[in-house]
Image (spheres, rainbow, N blue to C red):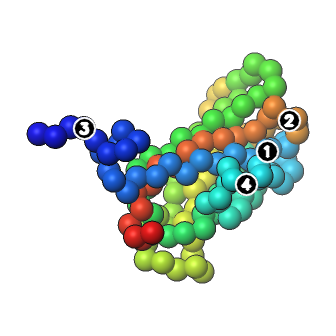
Amino acid sequence: MERGGYPGFTNNPMQKDLNFKFFVDAGNAPTLAASPLNNWVASVVRTSQGLYTLTFRDTGLIIGGFFAELTLNAAGATYAQAGPTTGFGAAYNPASPPTAVVFILNGAGAVTDPPAANANVFVSGVITIVDTSGF
């Protein structure tokens, strides 16, 4: 059996890693980092305390994995966790693009707002997708 994989050392020729990064500021609106880092991300909004929803620019993407982390300015017990996703793998519909939720949690596992704005306080991560749109 051939186990060489495809370029990028994946077992799928259509796999892509969609990286994202956004800056958080306690209970205020987040800010996307400048392109090209967020080329696939249309927007990020603070949905409620400790919940951030990323909206992606394309459908036809089957999700293979989702990872998020919170980078802090100092050691702490606050962290990010990948949450639910919707719309991945659906037929193209610009009115209903795929979304992914990132939770910010405290050491007890309760949803909480992140620390105040600082250049070293941000959420980053990767959504691994399989591109079924043929581009």
Residue 101 at x, y percent in the picture: 61, 53
Q: Is residue 110 above or below residue 12?
A: above
**Which label is found at residue 35?**
4
Q: Which mark is residue 23?
A: 1
Give the labeled residue for mark 3: 4
The answer to whether one can see residue 82 in this image is no
Q: Give the label, 1 or 4, closer to the camera.
A: 4
- Of the image marks 4 and 2, the number of the one nearer the N terminus: 4
Disc 2 crowd rating (10 Å Cα; few below 14, some 14-19, many 20+) is few
Q: Earlier in the sequence, mark 2 or mark 3?
A: 3
Q: Tell me if label 2 and label 1 are in contact, CB under 8 Å.
A: yes
From this view, report whether residue 80 is shown above or below residue 32. above
Between disc 1 and disc 3, the foreground one is 3
Q: CA distance from mark 1 to mark 3?
A: 38 Å
> Quadrant of the rendered structure where residue 69 is?
top right
* For marks 4 and 3 on the same chain, the one whose residue lies earlier in the sequence: 3
Q: Position of residue 72 (x, y in %)?
A: 76, 28
Give the distance between the C-alpha atoms of the residues marked 4 and 3, in whole angstroms.
33 Å
Foreground: disc 4 or disc 2: 4
Query: Which residue is disc 2 drawn over?
Result: 119
Amino acid tagged 3? Gly
Instruction: Bin the neighbour count of mark 3 within 10 Å (Cα to Cα): few under 14, some 14-19, many 20 and up.
Output: few
Q: Amino acid at mark 4?
A: Ser
